[in-house]
Amino acid sequence: MHFLTYVFIPPQADIDIAVAAAMRPYGDDFPAKPWKRYLDVEEIAAMAKCLGVRKSAMRKLAERMEKWNASTGGVDARGLYAVLTCNPDVKWDWYEIGGRWGGTGKLVFSALSLLRSAKKIFLPHDFVTPDGEWHARSRYVRTGWLNGRVIQKSEGRWRAEFSLALSSYPRHRVVCVDRHV
């Protein structure tokens, strides 16, 4: 899926370099320290059934985690987990400056000009501020192994959050990025 993302960059920065630096921590190839993803009861049941192990045999399931999702696993006080090295903050697998929204050129605006026309502008799906924070209008909340739901901010709340960012960085430029995930 494609999403419109705005990236705030300093006024004199090279567009390609500044956007790459802002987007890098959220890419699927960004190196991450190993972290634990705990399996819920539904996934444990599916794993146990697939591997022919009792659901309650947590140590055996941990030993066979690699067969389940190609990673090591373990058990602690919180439960059964997989040790992952993928980026837990991933937001894109590729992006293009301008992309479908830029036609043949790069779409770059001053934050101040966008702030002046804030009621008329097309709001992005998300944006990245110079402090490196990713702001998203919606987020996916996992409610089970294969289930989840999307929580979305109202248009008014999202417009207010974006306007606050524009007013916080009035001298910066805002670059339109076509982000794919």
Image (spheres, helix red, strand yellow):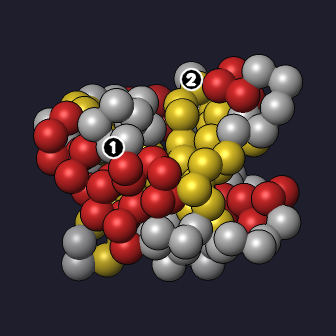
Q: Indicate the position of residue 17 as horizontal and vertical percent values.
A: 83, 65
Q: Indicate the position of residue 130 as horizontal and vertical percent values.
A: 54, 73
Place residue 156 in its image quadrant: top left
Residue 1, numbered circle: 2
Nearer to the camera, 104 or 90 = 104
Q: Which label sits in the foreground, 1 or 2?
A: 1
Residue pointed to by mark 1: 118
| Residue type at the position of mark 2 | Met
Label 2 packing within 10 angstroms: few (<14), some (14-19), many (20+): few
**Image marks 1 and 2: residues in contact by CB distance under 8 Å:** no
| Residue type at the position of mark 1 | Ala
Q: Indicate the position of residue 126 as horizontal and vertical percent values.
A: 44, 46
Place residue 78 in its image quadrant: bottom left
Q: Mark 1 or mark 2: which comes first in sequence?
A: 2
What residue is rendered at 30% in x and 55% in y? 163
Secondary structure under tag 1 reads loop
Q: How many marks?
A: 2
What residue is rendered at 44% in x and 38% in y? 124
Secondary structure under tag 2 reads loop
Place residue 26 in its image quadrant: bottom right
Nearer to the camera, 17 or 169 = 169
User: Cα distance, mark 1 to mark 2?
Assistant: 26 Å
Left or right: residue 151 versus residue 115 is left
Q: Indicate the position of residue 34 as horizontal and vertical percent values.
A: 59, 74
On the question of residue 35 being in view, the answer is no
Left or right: residue 58 versus residue 86 is left
Label 1 packing within 10 angstroms: few (<14), some (14-19), many (20+): some
On the question of residue 146 being in view, the answer is yes
